[in-house]
Amino acid sequence: MSPQVQSTMPPVYCYQHAEKTACDLCRKGFEVRQKLTDTPLQACPECGAKLKKIITKVNVHTGLTSAGGHTLSEKNITQQGFTQYRKVGPGQYEKTAGKQGPDQFNAKDL
Ligand SMILES: [Zn+2]
C-alpha cells in the first residue's frame, strides 16, 4: 500500500574549519549525518571556529561498490583520525565514532 520502506542512508556532510585557527577536530575535518533539510553546522563543537561544508560524502576511500555501504565504517573512521557525529534531536548531535571532540554537543550552544 505504501511501500516507502527505503533504506536510504542520511547524507553525510563533512565539515572543516574556515578560519586560520583550528583544533585537532576541525583541522582534520569531521563528518555529520544529517538530513538535507537540517541547518548546516556553523561552528566547530570543540573550538568554535567557523566551519565550511566541504563535501557531501561519497565513497572515495574504499572503492567498494557495495550497495548502501557508501560511508566509512565507524572503525575505519576512528583509525583514520576522523570523528563522526549523528543528529539525535533538534540541534543535538552525539559522537558515533572517533576520538576527537566532545561526546555530544548542541548546535545552538556553538
Ligand atoms: Zn575546532
Image: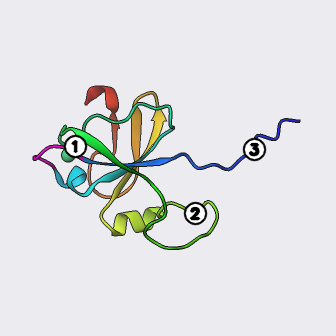
Question: Can the viewer see residue 10 in this picture?
Answer: yes
Residue 9 at x, y percent in the picture: 58, 50
In the figure, is residue 110 to the left or right of 38? left
Magenta span: chief secondary structure: loop
The residue identified by callout 2 is 69
Q: Secondary structure at mark 1?
A: loop
Question: Can the viewer see residue 44 in this picture?
Answer: no
- The amino acid sitting under disc 1 is Glu
- The amino acid sitting under disc 3 is Val
Q: Secondary structure at mark 3?
A: loop
Identify the mark nearer the N-term, 3 or 1: 3
Residue shown at the point (27%, 27%) measured from the top left:
109
In the figure, is residue 66 to the left or right of 35? right
Q: Secondary structure at mark 2?
A: loop
Which is closer to the viewer, label 3 or label 1?
3
> Residue most toward the right?
1
Q: Can you tell which mark lies on residue 5?
A: 3
As for residue 69 lying within the magenta part, the answer is: no
Q: Is the distance from the Cβ of mark 2 to the nearest ligand 1 atom less than 8 Å?
A: no
Residue shown at the point (33%, 52%) measured from the top left:
30
In the figure, is residue 33 to the left or right of 2? left
Identify the mark nearer the N-term, 1 or 2: 1
Q: Can you tell which mark lies on residue 46?
A: 1
The residues colored magenta run 17-22
Q: Is the distance from the Cβ of mark 1 to the nearest ligand 1 atom less than 8 Å?
A: yes
Q: Can you tell which mark lies on residue 13?
A: none
Q: How is the image coloured?
A: rainbow
